Image (cartoon, grey):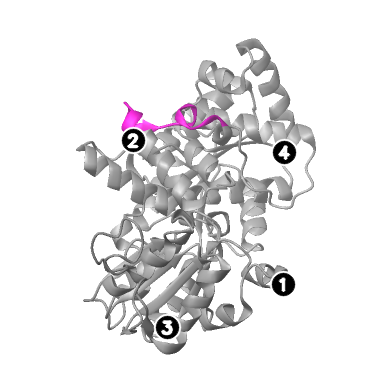
Amino acid sequence: MDQILVVDDAPETLEVVQRNLVSRGWRVRVASGVAEAMAALDEGPVDLVITDLKMPKASGLDLVRHVRENLADTEVMMITGFPSIEGAVEAVKTGADEYLPKPFTEDELVAAVRRSLDKLRMRRAGLAPADRLPSRHAGLIGDSAQARRLNHAIGKAALTSATCLITGESGTGKELVARAIHYGSARAAAPFVPVNCGGIPDGLIESELFGHRKGAFTGAAESRAGFFQTADGGTIFLDEIGDLPIAMQVKLLRVLEDKQVFMVGSSRPMQLDVRILAATNKDLGALVERGAFRDDLFFRIAVLTIDVPALRDRGDDVLRLTRHFAEKFAGELGKPVPRFSDGALRSIAGYHWPGNVRELENVVQRLVVMGDHAVIDVPELPPAMRASLPRSTGDHRTLAEVEAEHIRNVLSSVDGNVTRAAGILEIDRKTLRLKLGTAKRHE
């Protein structure tokens, strides 16, 4: 449960904020000034500090600086009864992630606290070293409920030699799942042979899969083993199996039933011990209904079925994978691992990722290769990602409220730099200052 420290010299404010937050399930401690707050921070970890701006002796900005310089894993939110554009910019530049003017409603307070804790969650996920994540299978980085279910299914599939159909959108990592099943099984020491069924011309696919004898067809100058012979004792992975022509589906069904193959040009069967894993990003059930895929083959390859979730459905795994790929490509280039700003992490988490993990890997590789700074910020991201907003929380917000949040997010991502924020928003500085004033009225 998140731990919150509220700092204010007004006892009535402390009492109201503490009561409202405790009623929502958060653990709350209070302090009446900066010195007392620093002592409380020394006593134990705090996830979020909510501090008043103007207090006797030391101001809230002093506390913000202390937290930012000494507690990297703590968020800060500023509240004040003297709101101004200059104060908001100064608070953001000092390190406050939220700026809430008094008087505020309970809903406004709770929304600001949730935004702050969401930022902390994203930062923690984005900084988690990949080798400390609980994923048990090589290449499958994640700690979401979906990732855990996937790992559990992989572990179960690895215990058998049954055929398995792996489904999921393009780029989700279906081959990684197949490799994890193979290398977690008793066949791990034998070959794993991946085959892209959609990448082999129809006229060559039988020869490629089952091999051919010398003279079997024009150009067959010598006998050659196929992918199935290469995989003997191990696993063959038939990717995009939905692209197999009907004639080859019949022959593959015979292999599944008889455990033997006929090389092209040979009348003698060859007995093989091969486990078949298949994958597709198509709806094989719909293909069966249209007569484009044999129902008997479908039932034979789908003894076990594993669905690989889309990246957009895996929560904070996108940030864990971002860190993983940044470490990977920085290591290959001999460069320091870059850090992603809070704004960049929000954009990455809010993007739809139609290309899934493959798209994320390509984006991070490009950022690491082309980047010249220690921190990857919003302006370095692809345009489509710079325009993305965090996923909707289900609130019924006005357009002005959405614009206010977006301005605040952009300003925070560039550490309060009005010129850079105006450039990202594609407006001039004067317009941004006017919108900042409007944004403060909607916070």
What amino acid is labelled 4 in the image? Pro
Q: Which residue is mark 2?
A: 368
Towards the viewer: 59 or 297:
297
Name the amino acid type tagged 2: Val
Quote the CA–CA distance across marks 2 and 3. 37 Å
* Label 4–label 3 contact, CB within 8 A: no
In this rendering, which labeled residue sits more in front, label 4 or label 3? 3
Of the image marks 4 and 1, the number of the one nearer the N terminus: 4
C-alpha gap between disc 2 and disc 4: 44 Å
Cα–Cα gap, marks 3 and 1: 30 Å
Disc nearer the start of the sequence (4/3) = 4
| Camera-nearest label, 3 or 1 | 1
Instruction: Give the number of the disc on residue 289.
Output: 1
Q: What's drawn in magenta, residue-wise?
A: 368-383
Residue sitting at x 69%, y 68%: 286
Alpha carbon distance from label 1 to label 2 = 46 Å
Mark 4–mark 1 CB contact (< 8 Å): no
Q: Foreground residue, 223 or 375?
A: 223
Determine whether, in the image, residue 318 is placed left or right of residue 402. left
